[in-house]
């Protein structure tokens, strides 16, 4: 995982909030850090928008699970996307998730 994101994930793991939407809001620091990383690397505004969107969707898919996703969870999500979205959509989501969790 990106070393800049690790402290934020650890903070979220210790969150005591149980409400789904409250937990989702706690992901804002992670998504803000993702945005900073994408901008710092000079990616296009379209890439920034897509990466933030796809990672927000993935975090929503994981719901309240704040630990790092397992390989199986990522694969299950990709199967879900391939069954419900286009191959291009699934490929972009995978690229965004890889960038976020590297």
Image (spheres, helix red, strand yellow):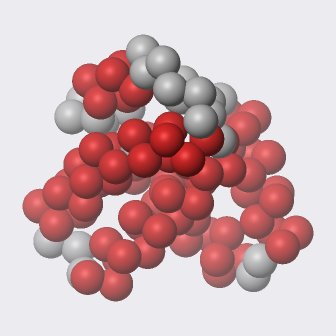
Seen in the image, is 89 located left or right of residue 59?
A: right
Q: Position of residue 67 (x, y in %)?
A: 54, 24
Seen in the image, is 41 located left or right of residue 97?
A: left
Q: Position of residue 3 (x, y in %)?
A: 24, 29
Nearer to us in this view, 67 or 70: 67
Task: Tell me which residue sits at (21%, 34%) in the image.
Answer: 4
Question: How many dots with numbers?
Answer: 0
Q: Position of residue 52 (x, y in %)?
A: 40, 64
Residue 11 falls in which quadrant of the image?
A: top left
Nearer to us in this view, 80 or 12: 12
Q: Residue furthest right?
A: 83
Q: Position of residue 44 (x, y in %)?
A: 25, 81
Q: Is residue 95 visible?
A: no
Q: Is residue 83 above or below residue 44?
A: above
Task: Tell me which residue sits at (77%, 77%) in the image.
Answer: 85
Q: Quadrant of the C terminus?
A: top left
Q: Is residue 87 visible?
A: yes
Task: Tell me which residue sits at (26%, 24%) in the image.
Answer: 7
Q: Quadrant of the N terminus?
A: top left
Nearer to us in this view, 16 or 73: 16
Seen in the image, is 78 located left or right of residue 84?
A: left
Task: Tell me which residue sits at (49%, 41%) in the image.
Answer: 22
């Amino acid at each position: 995982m990106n070393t800049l994101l690790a402290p934020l994930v650890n903070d979220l793991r210790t969150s005591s909030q149980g409400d789904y939407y409250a937990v989702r809001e706690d992901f804002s620091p992670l998504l803000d850090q993702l945005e900073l990383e994408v901008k710092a690397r000079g990616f296009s505004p379209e890439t920034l928008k897509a990466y933030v969107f796809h990672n927000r969707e993935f975090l929503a898919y994981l719901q309240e699970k704040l630990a790092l996703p397992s390989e199986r969870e990522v694969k299950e999500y990709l199967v879900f996307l391939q069954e419900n979205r286009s191959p291009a959509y699934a490929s972009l989501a995978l690229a965004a998730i890889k960038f976020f969790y590297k």
